[in-house]
Image (cartoon, grey):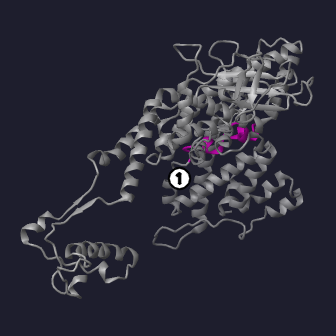
Amino acid sequence: MAQSSVTQNKEWQRTAWDYYDCIGELRFGINWISNAMSRVNLVAARAPLAAGDEPVPISLDDPDILPVHRRAAEIVSMIAHGPAGQGQMLGSFGTHLSVVGVGWLVVEPPLDDPISDEFTSWTVLSSDEIRRSPAGQIEVRVSETEWREVHPNAVVVKVWRRHPRRSWESDSPVRGTLSVLREIDLLERHIQATAQSRLAGAGLLAIPSEAVFPPGQGPQSSTGVDPDDEDITAPEDNFVETLIETMTVPLIDRGSAASVVPLVVKMPGELVGQVKHLTFATPFDDRARDLLDNAIRRLALGLDIPPEILTGTGGMNHWGAWQVAEEAITLHVEPLTETVAHALTMGFLVPALIAEGFDPSDVLVWYDTSDLRTRPDRSANAVAAYDRNALSREALLREMGLSVEDLPSDEERREQILLSIIRGVPALASPLLEDLGLIGADLAVNLDMPDEALMPALPVSQPETQGPPEPQVTASALTAACDVIIRRALERAGSRLRSAAGKGQPGGAASVQVGDPCSIHTIIDASAHSDFASLLDGAWSLVPEIAERYGADSDSLIDSLETYTRALLAAQQEHSYARLSLALGTA
């Protein structure tokens, strides 16, 4: 039975538990870190090779895994019966370590089988629930007055945070905030006592004894008062009774006239200012709420969590709130989880591996906080960066929550590009569909026949001339000018494609042996090395001038040339004057 020294709670620890039970702000802060730790997963890992390195998690799918690593991963996966039990166990340790700095893990086989070594119970206990009997046996509490001995083969692990000055003592964030908690408790008691005193009475109302009702008002006006009759209440007593009745009736019946009609009282003028309402409030009452708010802020600074967790993040944007959460995980949740992981390594994993004949020197219990980390949505920025060739496809998928396994194959990607081009320029459907293998060569020949219904209309406005326009001459001249631009664009794209294809190759771009730069795309798959936007960047700078010269719409002409050139790159086809004429609808 593995065990450590068992000690009882000290006075400060008992006080800390009492405050945890009665102060809601403290309970909220402690439960926050407890809930965060319950989302952490335990994993087996190989010890880091150098200082500053992170442990490397062990994967059972690794074909080269060592037997000791495989057994370590199996043992860690069995802790607390898997992820669900591990989450509850880590959450409990988050509470114990944050409040009093110590908790006990008791792992036991079935109690009705004294020789069993198969652990079925994983329990986290406080120091109030575990003790050493006079006979030296470890006992756990099962009720307020009843204790029992632990199983003979039980494993008892002490998980604690050492005090930096007195290493034999445990320490916790709550220990440093006890004075603040005491202040919060006193202020809350004062506010409650003040509220109760207000409910018990509204103070005193001092009225001069000379105050009487005017004739015709009050109970004494309906019947004459005989001063010698001892059974008749004195007028001043009737005054007080009537005043009380007039003030309480509106509380019961809101429709009563007494709620809007004032009570008329007759008294000498010099006595009017002597009617006073006396209360028992003190100047401290007005400051109590501010003092309480200040004490709560001090408590937020003293706990082992970002202060904004307790005081709220309502004034932050989503980036600020995300940064607070990241800071909480890195600086608070992970260090506390490391404490538990180290205790499980030394108190459970290492003894288990040694008992089975393994060398546990390079394995340990570690943690995975990926379930806690929720990154902000950066997909829109990722798409924009990808469109500007500043982001890889893998990074784009990661930011969009997808995997590289979702990427299309090279053939699927090529088909998607060609089909998108066909939808934009139906006139190019014939060669592209033939290239995809969707139609035969005989049908492709038929489709190559000019079809006005399939050709995009080129918006050409004839310049004003004295004679009749010559559309055929104008269209031929426009096509000839565009032919030069296309060849220049393909030459530019070919040079860039050559550089992209030569990256990582001995000799660089010089290793790519090609002839005409305009035809490089027919030999090298452009989509495999770069994107078309990069290859054609700046290729259409002269198009607005040509469009103006021949009366064409500049934007439409650029779109037509861009689509045509992209189709050539995607289909790895040669450019020709006839094909360009067909694409522009000028054939």
Tell me the magenta residue range.
Answer: 518-539
**Looking at the image, which is closer to me, 68 or 339?**
339
Element assignment for label 1:
helix
The 10 Å Cα crowd at callout 1, few under 14, some 14 to 19, many 20 or more, is many
Toward the left, the furthest residue is 270
- In this orientation, does residue 296 appear? no
Quadrant that contains the N terminus: top right
| Rendered residue at 48%/26% (across/down) | 176
| Residue 43 point in image, percent of width and height | 76, 28
Quadrant that contains the C terminus: bottom right
Circle 1: residue type: Val
| Rendered residue at 53%/42% (across/down) | 22
| Picture quadrant where residue 475 is located | bottom right
| Picture quadrant where residue 216 is located | bottom left
| Picture quadrant where residue 381 is located | top right
Q: How many marks?
A: 1
Horizontal placement of 586 versus 244: left or right? right
| Residue 458 point in image, percent of width and height | 60, 65
Magenta-span inclusion, residue 152: no
Residue picked out by circle 1:
543
Horizontal placement of 12 versus 215: left or right? right
Horizontal placement of 54 versus 250: left or right? right
| Residue 426 point in image, percent of width and height | 72, 62
- In this orientation, does residue 31 appear? yes
**Looking at the image, which is closer to me, 307 or 183?**
183
| Rendered residue at 37%/73% (across/down) | 251
| Residue 536 point in image, percent of width and height | 60, 44
**Looking at the image, which is closer to me, 362 or 567?**
362
